[in-house]
Every structure is written in structure tokens, then in C-alpha cells.
Image (cartoon, rainbow, N blue to C red):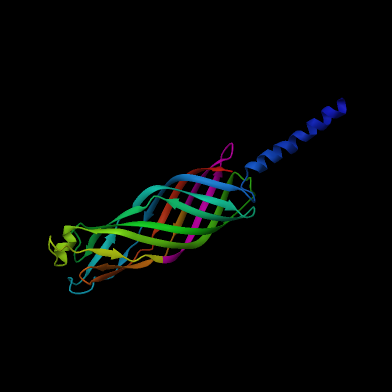
Amino acid sequence: MKNTTTVKFLLIPALLACAVAAQAQSAGTWLGRIGGTKITPNVTSDDMTAPSLAGTKASIDSSSRLSGGVTYMVSDNLAIDVPLAVPFQHDINGDGAILGAGKIADVKALPVTLMAQWRFLEPNAPVRPYVGAGVTYAAFYGARSTSTLTALTGGTPSNPTTLSVDSKWAATLQLGASFQLKDGWFIDASYTVTPLRTRTTLSTGQTLDTTLNPTSFSLSIGMRF
């Protein structure tokens, strides 16, 4: 009886270790998260093509939306991550020669990204910093012009100026960290940068090329499965 009690006592640390490992970010683990993301375009605008006023440019506002994602741990350190988000909406404002004109359009954006991440330290470490690299398809749709853009480009209320923004592929780089909590929960924070350049085409035939190079910051709470 004494031997049996001793064996059970010695097994307790091993059982606790197994319980921790089951909650750790180890190979075969799925991670789900939900939170928020802010995307900030870092815009460098070319001039709009003729016959617009020389120096006509545009700036683009930031946008914040509900976001989340799913991660699969391929190994104890290598992960595949798919960020998810509600479509973002960005206001487009006059800049350069038309600075002060205000909002000239808005457009919806849905970045579809696939990331490969390398997570440092042990699977059950309290904090796991990581780096990631992947590819993003930046889908722009639902662009809407304002009466200001129509007036600036020679349109009329009966024949307003419309516009479209080209969707583009781009690389994405990521830096982040996962902070482990109790019972399989964790907090995730990440920062990404996506070198991106696109073209806006107006119904007048004019075009405007812009370098967007958006950065994003995401903060989420998640659960290991």
C-alpha cells in the first residue's frame, strides 16, 4: 500500500507536466483569436493625370475594425496563420493642390493574408515573441466618390465622376508576441507592414497612382485547442 501511494505521488509532477503541454502552443495545436485591428496607410501620392490641376494629390485615412484569426502550429516553432477581419473603410481626402477640399471619396478594403510565423522559446513559455512573413491580396471595392470630386473633375450632378481602385498582391512582414494566460487562454499583439502601390482610375479617364505601404496593429484575445 505504501509503495502504491509513493508511485502515485511520483506521478503527480508528470501528470501536471502533461496538462501544461496540452495547453501549450505545441505542434498540432490550433489557436483562435478575436480582437481589433487598425490599418494606417502611409501614403505617398503621385499627381493626378491631366486635365486636373497640377499637384492634385490624395491622402487616405486610417481605419479600425473587428478582427481575429486562426493559427495552426506545424511544429513547436513553425506556425501557419490566417488573419480575418471585417472589411475596412478608408476615407480619401484631397491633398497637394487640393489640400483642404476635404473628403473626395471612400473605398472598402479587405486584406486577405496567409502568414508563416516562427515562434521563439518553448511551447509553454509565458511569452512567445514571433516573426512572420507572407503574402497579401489587398482587395479594394465599393469605391464611392463625393460631390467634391465631381466638381473638381468637371462632372455634374447628373453625370457624377466615379472611380475604382486596383486590387493588388503584396508581401507582408510581421512582428508579434503571444502572452499565455490560464486555462489555454492567451493575448496576442502583432504589427505588420505591407509594401503596396495601387492606381485609382476615374470615369473621366484620369488616374492617380499612390504608394500606400500600410502598417497595422492588432490586439486580440484567444484560446488554444
State how many labels appear: 0
Residue at image location 48% in from the left, 52% down from the top: 190
Q: Position of residue 3 (x, y in %)?
A: 87, 29
Residue at image location 48% in from the left, 48% down from the top: 189
Q: Position of residue 130 (x, y in %)?
A: 55, 54
Judge left or right: residue 156 versus residue 133.
left
Is residue 188 highlighted in magenta? yes
Q: Is residue 37 above or below residue 150?
A: above
Q: Position of residue 143 (x, y in %)?
A: 28, 59
Judge left or right: residue 110 versus residue 59.
right
View extreme (top): residue:
1
Name the chief secondary structure element in magenta. Answer: strand
Q: Which residues are magenta?
A: 169-190
Q: Position of residue 41 (x, y in %)?
A: 35, 59
Q: Is residue 21 above or below residue 209?
A: above
Q: Quadrant of residue 46?
A: bottom left
View extreme (bottom): residue:
50
33 or 173: nearer the viewer: 33
Asked if residue 47 can be seen in this view, the reply is no
Asked if residue 2 can be seen in this view, the reply is yes
Residue at image location 83% in from the left, 30% down from the top: 6
Quarter of the figure that contains the C terminus = top right
Q: Quadrant of residue 61?
A: bottom left
Quarter of the figure that contains the N terminus = top right
Q: Is residue 54 above or below residue 25?
A: below
